[in-house]
Image: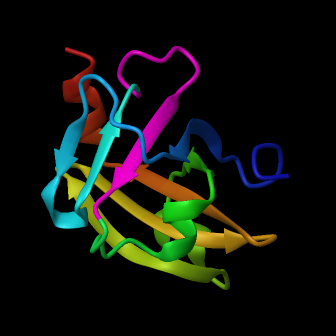
């Protein structure tokens, strides 16, 4: 339904880990490390968190699936929100919702940011 009815597009799966991995990128704001997304053909993203990371406990312990959406505000309307909309990097807005007890990340890319990445 997420893809066929809502038009959401698969982006990645985030998997929490406590194992340090090669080429981790540190996200200071979230006190977490991410790795593998840039090199994974299937969109696997490993996430390792510092003990005092402000990320929602469910996101730190349960894998999440992420979808790209055209309109983040419309996509989260009426949903239980785990992480309020925020911009982790230029041209991207994200939010985490709860679906059937699991975290789901929704991402909206600004069109001009997406166009620049294709250059």
**Residue occupying image coordinates x 40% and y 61%:** 94
Q: Nearer the viewer, residue 106 or 74?
A: 106
Picture quarter containing residue 98? Answer: bottom right
Above or below, comparing residue 60 to residue 56 in the picture: above
Asked if residue 43 lies in the magenta stretch, the reply is yes
Query: Residue 39: x and y, percent?
Result: 39, 15
**Residue occupying image coordinates x 39% and y 25%:** 36
Q: Nearer the viewer, residue 118 or 65?
A: 65
Query: Residue 21: x and y, percent?
Result: 34, 29
- Considering the image in quadrants, where does the C terminus appear? top left
Asked if residue 25 lies in the magenta stretch, the reply is no
Q: How many marks?
A: 0
**Residue occupying image coordinates x 51% and y 68%:** 96
Q: Is residue 112 left or right of residue 42?
A: left
Query: Residue 114: x and y, percent?
Result: 30, 33
Give, as a single range, the part of the protein colored magenta. 37-50
Above or below, comparing residue 69 to residue 50 in the picture: above
Q: Is residue 116 left or right of residue 107?
A: left
Query: Residue 17: x and y, percent?
Result: 48, 46
Q: How is the image coloured?
A: rainbow
Q: Nearer the viewer, residue 45 or 5?
A: 45
Above or below, comparing residue 28 to residue 37 in the picture: below
Q: Is residue 6 left or right of residue 95?
A: right
**Residue occupying image coordinates x 21% and y 37%:** 25
């Amino acid at each position: 339904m997420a893809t066929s009815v809502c038009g959401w597009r698969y982006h990645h799966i985030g998997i929490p880990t406590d194992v340090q991995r090669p080429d981790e990128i540190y996200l200071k704001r979230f006190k977490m490390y991410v790795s593998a997304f840039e090199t994974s053909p299937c969109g696997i993203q490993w996430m390792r968190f510092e003990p005092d990371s402000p990320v929602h406990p469910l996101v730190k312990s349960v894998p999440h699936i992420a979808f790209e959406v055209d309109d983040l505000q419309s996509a989260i309307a009426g949903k239980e929100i785990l992480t309020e909309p925020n911009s982790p990097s230029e041209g991207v807005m994200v939010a985490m919702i709860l679906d059937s007890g699991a975290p789901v990340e929704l991402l909206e890319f600004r069109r001009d940011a997406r166009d620049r990445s294709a250059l």
